[in-house]
Amino acid sequence: MRIIVPVDGSAPATHAVVHALSLARNAQDAEILLVNVQSRETIEVSDVAAVISADADREAAARQSKKALRRAIGLCREAAVKFEARAELGPVAETIARLARELKADQIVMGTRGLGALRGLVLGSVATNVIHLARIPVTLVK
């Protein structure tokens, strides 16, 4: 079983990692893929001001990804579950759905920031977009 867990360093993402670990412990040959996706919108404002090239974009994204993945990696190591961590650059929901297809994942487990219904409709959300784009089950964890 291959489970993709998008992480952004938030508490809901950490809860998703914990849930995915519980699923992985109960499945033979389970593997967790932790993925952090950075886009121009997710790179810190201070970094955006400094970005003047594609290489600088990648460097800023890599710094943000490393920070976002740190806690999730620690949890997977503590649980002694097979895992891989990846940093990606691109549109967040689309990149998560693409990885799920390319890696033949069985499930996506992700946190939600719990936006109110109206705010979620106006702004949209990564979780909602992943649900629409993914071809596999998506579990949302608060």
Image (tube, rainbow, N blue to C red):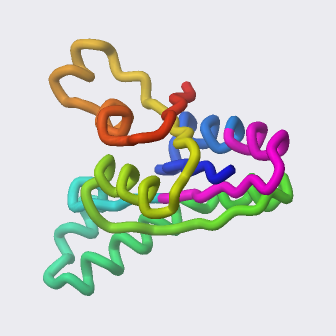
Residue 13 at x, y percent in the picture: 55, 41
Residue 2 at x, y percent in the picture: 63, 53
Q: Is 57 placed left or right of 61 in the picture?
A: left
Instruction: Answer with the quarter of the image where residue 115 lies.
Output: top left
Q: Viewer-proximal residue, 20 or 104?
A: 104
| Residue shown at 83% from the left, 44% from the top | 25
Q: Which residues are magenta?
A: 20-35
Q: Viewer-proximal residue, 60 or 15?
A: 15
| Residue shown at 52% from the left, 42% from the top | 108
| Residue shown at 52% from the left, 68% from the top | 86
Q: Is 57 placed left or right of 101 in the picture?
A: left
Q: Is 31 placed left or right of 94 in the picture?
A: right
Instruction: Answer with the quarter of the image where residue 95 lies.
Output: bottom left
| Residue shown at 23% from the left, 30% from the top | 124
Q: Does the magenta portion include 126?
A: no
Q: Does the magenta portion include 33?
A: yes
Q: Viewer-proximal residue, 22 or 30?
A: 30
Up/down of 130 relative to 28, above or below: above
